[in-house]
Image: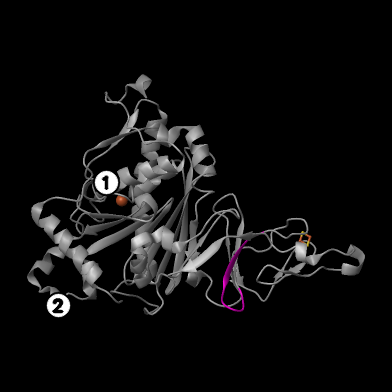
Amino acid sequence: MENLNVYKDLIKRMLTMVDAGVTDSAPAAYRQPSSVYTDPALFAREKATIFKDEPQLVCFSSDLPEKGSYFTFDDLDVPVLLTRDNDGKVHAFLNACTHRAARLKEGCGKTASLSCPYHNWGFDLKGKLRAVWEEKSFGAIDKSLYDLVRLPVEEKYGMIFAGMHPDVKVSVDEILGHMAPVFEMWDLGATRFVDQHEWKLKTNWKLALDTFCEGYHFLALHKKTLGGISIGNTSAFDTFGPEGRNHRLAFPNESIKRLKEIPEAEWGMDIFNDFQLVHFVYPNISLLVSPVSIEFFKLYPGANPGEHRTVFRSYVRSTNDEKGWDGNDPQAHFDFICKVVDEEDYWVSANVMKNLNAGMINFSTFGANEPALQNMHKAFLRGIGTTPEEAPVGKVGAVASC
Ligand code: FES
Ligand SMILES: [Fe+2]
């Protein structure tokens, strides 16, 4: 990896905070009405705006590893088919035949062309209709009018972003802003897929996302897992992308203190063992990145405000040994992350939702020490065309005022 200096600077920031017993902070605590998690009208607007009008990080380049690869994406209401053509270029289409709309592909794999399972029409990997089955009896049609429905897509820095309708503008550099060179350095496409897990949980999608966006809970909720590793309640917080709506959090581990005794010139790649890096990419992605592995969480709204689905995909650098890295087996690492999320973060998200549904907790409070949560939720409200407004001062439980 080049440009280790970016992360040396981050280490220095964290060491200063650790020494002073402080963390990057917002100016003050912020109260958010509970309706943000429970209101069906707000939920419908989120689905119609921030999920439909904004580019989505769908997968990495390694999910379409070679010419002829295809990858389907069904996490939102629009079935998407990605292909890599024989020139290596990635395309995104509605996963629908233009004869009578049958689904073309399932899952992922490799193919020379796209053949519809319903009546056998054939398309090339660029979406052109090439063959109408039993064409003589079907009757003459202008084939040029029957190309697959194209969706916007861009592949850059090993990531593939797509829009869920043809008018969505997809610009990876715009999405990443000043952090683009850092993502370029990570080259997230140079990875090997390890495993996938899905959660369907009775909680709002944002409540699940909240657990990725602060370290205030580390030493309490994760005391048996991360408690002995992380310093807790300390993070370096940076924003990036349009209106700073994305963020990066760096959480120092206890082991970071060892670097105080080592001259900076001797700091090497092992500094990445001394902190955890979590990136939020608007509206629903949490990316945990290290030189050896990538944890890719995609969080989606369910059928109503109280249901959500997370797709978690884990990757290791393709250059790493199949059997393991840092003394760990990638599959064991994947299983560990699933267990922490399942038994700790998502356990708490589901019980929070149950309590919010009871209707007597009228606002949640994000502390000054939780700046990423404040920033992210304000961006969601802007995204649905609402001005962020703090819940009125008053006692929790004053239902009528909310
Ligand atoms: S729907 Fe695809 S060939 Fe008929
Ligand atoms: Fe957590």
Q: Is residue 367 left or right of residue 118?
A: left
Identify whether 393 is placed above or below 166.
Answer: above
State the extent of the magenta-drawn residues as a range: 85-95
Please say which color scheme the image uses.
Answer: one colour
| Sequence-wise first label, 1 or 2 | 2
Q: Nearer the viewer, residue 286 or 337?
A: 286
The number of callouts visible is 2
Within 10 angstroms of label 2, few (less than 14), some, or many (20 or more) residues? few
> Looking at the picture, which amino acid does disc 2 mark?
Glu
Residue 204 spot, x, y in % from top left: 44, 41
Residue 346 spot, x, y in % from top left: 38, 47
- The residue beneath circle 2 is 266
Residue drawn at x 23%, y 62% as measured from the top left: 275
Q: In the rendered image, is residue 94 in sight?
A: no
Q: Nearer the viewer, residue 290 or 372?
A: 372
Q: Quadrant of the N terminus?
A: bottom left
Assess whether residue 168 is covered by the magenta stretch: no
Within 10 angstroms of label 1, few (less than 14), some, or many (20 or more) residues? many
Q: Secondary structure at mark 1?
A: helix
Q: In the rendered image, is residue 251 in sight?
A: yes
